[in-house]
Amino acid sequence: MRICVISDVHFKYKHKSEADRQNAALFLDFLSSSVGRYDLMVLNGDIFDLYNEWKYSIIRQYFPVYHLLANIREAGCRIVFISGNHDFWFNGFLDKDLGIEVYHDQFYLEADGMRMIFSHGDLYTSNDVRYQLFRRLIRQPFIKWIFNLLHPELALFIGAKMSRSSRVRRVPGFMQSRRSQGLQSWAEKMISRKKADIVVLGHSHRPGIHAMGGGHYANAGDWIKNHSYLEITDGSIKLIYHNKEKAQ
Ligand SMILES: [Mn+2]
């Protein structure tokens, strides 16, 4: 089975810099080169930097991504979307219109003799109680209901302000390494308790494959700095850096 995992693309609805435009172009290039290449694509959270589906509206600027995901689906690939801490409010568009399976916490798979757990990872950072409370609150249907009463452009404006301030708040280097340590020790626990052979997380923006206790913890990295993704082919994991020249 050919599996591909990506996370932390942070695709923006508004490109403010040349770097934003380049990151978006590289990601779209990667998606088009993935049509017909995989049996399963796991979108492991924070694919979109800011996300919402209203009852009758979607964010127009995400159309290129939706279009390529539809092509990948039509070529016979199963697509799984796991929500991250930037994309968690859905309203039927991904699943009903695009045929993508949506999971809120984690996705479990047994294939090629391996047990695999995929999750974004924001649930498993250590000592981040304030965030865990915020996570629970922001996912309440009532909050989403209020947000959806706003005009989409006003809602996006407010959402962008909130998401920017939460990003700035969580940037410090020591927090980054504590975050990735939390992810690693959660993966270690799953492997040592024989719950999984492969644990794939995102969130830390640190690409890597780590062998531990007879299994592997892998992180797909991000598409802001690394433009990295994972391929799990017949149970063996490879980390790949997408390069436009090398693609095709
Ligand atoms: Mn994240």
Image (cartoon, grey):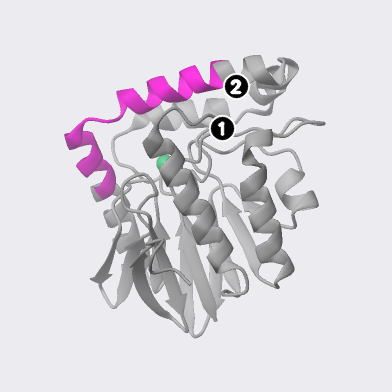
Whether label 1 lies within 8 Å of ligand 1 gets the answer no
Q: Is residue 230 above or below residue 86?
A: below
N-term-proximal mark, 1 vs 2: 1
| Residues at discs 1 and 2 in contact (Cβ within 8 Å) | yes
> Considering the numbered disc 2 on the image, is that residue within a helix, a strand or a loop?
helix
Residue 229 at x, y percent in the picture? 41, 62
Location of ligand 1 given as a quarter of the image = top left
Magenta region? 158-180
Where is residue 136 shown, x and y percent of the image? 52, 31
Quadrant of res 110: bottom right
Kindly identify which residue carries mark 2. 156
Please tell me whether the stretch drawn in magenta is mainly helix, strand or loop: helix
Picture coordinates of residue 142, whole percent (x, y):
68, 22
- The kind of residue on which mark 1 rests is Tyr
- Residue nearest the observer in this picture, 151 or 71: 71
Residue shown at the point (47%, 63%) measured from the top left: 5
Q: Give the alpha-carbon distance from disc 1 to disc 2, as whole Å.
A: 9 Å
Task: Tell me where residue 68 sits by quadrant.
Answer: bottom right
Instruction: Tell me: residue 54, above or below residue 115.
Output: above
Which residue is painted at 38% across and 69% down in the image? 246
State the quadrant of the N terminus. bottom right
The amino acid beneath tag 2 is: Leu
Name of the residue lying farthest toward the right = 56
Packing grade of label 2 (10 A; few <14, some 14-19, many >=20) is: some
Q: Which residue is mark 1?
A: 13
Q: Where, by quadrant of the figure, is residue 190 drawn? A: bottom left
Provide the secondary structure element on which disc 1 rests.
Answer: loop
